[in-house]
Amino acid sequence: MKTDFRHPEKQKNIDSPIKKKPSWIRSKIIDSATFHKTKNIVLKNNLHTVCQEANCPNITECWSKKHATFMILGDTCTRACAFCDVKTGIPKIVDPLEPQRVAAAVKDLELKHVVITSVDRDDLDDGGATHFKNVILAIKKINPKTTIEVLTPDFLKKGEAYKKVIEAEPDVFNHNVETVPSLYLKVRPGSRYYASVKLLEQVKQINPSLFTKSGIMVGMGESLEEILQVMDDLRAANVDFLTIGQYLQPSSKHFPLHRYVEPKEFDELKNRALAKGFLLVSSSPLTRSSYHADDDFILLKNQRVKELNLEH
């Protein structure tokens, strides 16, 4: 019988108890008033955030800083990845007014940098690419100074639909490979590792000036050699940014946590990744795709400005 950690009722004798979190995995509210203000803006605009739907450990810190990652195309995913806490099922129809609501929330939060992600929508002919484009354009219309980062699905078997996202010219195109190839059949059964890497490579080929980004989780049973190979694969695809974070098992029905990786190991991985040529690397137990994404992007922009000034 095929292992399905998202649907334990189909399995017998599967028990994956959650390991107690170590002291270094903690997130605190920095400003409770701002936290609640962010929450109210999200609610007022009837929006979903990956912070809530995926039970992100950084929600208190990020919302205390008025940072939120908006999750478009509904709150129901057509896939059932074994690591993810977003619910799976039959999604609702796409809301044509969502782009305007997202843009309004970005304005209310006064965001300098915004991250837009989504559930997988295999039920749509273009995987949701047109909706991504509409959201990007709506944000640009009333927030012209806000930089935009998209964290997209893989658009598997959707042909060239991903090009619609590129046409809207976001500042960063992110797609996470999530884990090493050997774990894909168990962790991401509906995805294909090399298809994800190829997507990032094609994005860069179409628009070389567009920053590309990807991320992986560690602590799922992968080896150091496998992590380093993923880094090499992503650099071969000219990926600019890399995030490395600790896998946190959402529940006993999800893929079992192998181990908690210590902070010093994350530092070592960061140094290895930088040596391989990534422009930016975020590597820590609490790192997620959008964690400190605004600060990282601003830092990179400032570096680029300095480099250009030196050249002239």
Image (cartoon, rainbow, N blue to C red):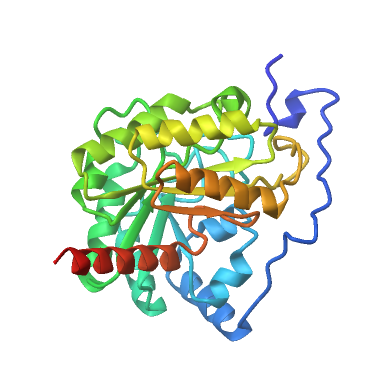
Q: In percent of the image, x 50 and y 71: which residue is there?
A: 43
| Spot occupied by residue 50 in the image (x, y as percentages of width and height) | 52, 56
Q: Nearer the viewer, residue 310 or 59?
A: 310
Residue 123 placement: quadrant: top left
Residue 32 placement: quadrant: bottom right
Q: Nearer the viewer, residue 18 or 120?
A: 18
Horizontal side of 255 relative to 94 (left or right) equals right
Res. 80 visible in picture: no
Horizontal side of 163 relative to 174 (left or right) equals left
Q: Dividing the image into 4 quarters, which one contains the C terminus?
A: bottom left
Q: Nearer the viewer, residue 128 or 274?
A: 274
Horizontal side of 95 relative to 89 (left or right) equals left
Q: Dividing the image into 4 quarters, which one contains the N terminus?
A: top right
Q: In percent of the image, x 63 and y 26: which residue is there?
A: 186
Q: Residue pushed farthest bottom?
A: 33
**Looking at the picture, does residue 91 appear above or below residue 158?**
below
Q: In percent of the image, x 22 and y 59: which residue is there?
A: 137
| Spot occupied by residue 262 in the image (x, y as percentages of width and height) | 73, 50
| Spot occupied by residue 86 in the image (x, y as percentages of width and height) | 58, 46
| Spot occupied by residue 34 in the image (x, y as percentages of width and height) | 55, 82
User: How many numbered dots are placed on residues in this image?
Assistant: 0
**Looking at the picture, does residue 101 appear above or below residue 279?**
below
Res. 81 visible in picture: yes
**Looking at the picture, does residue 191 appear above or below residue 37?**
above
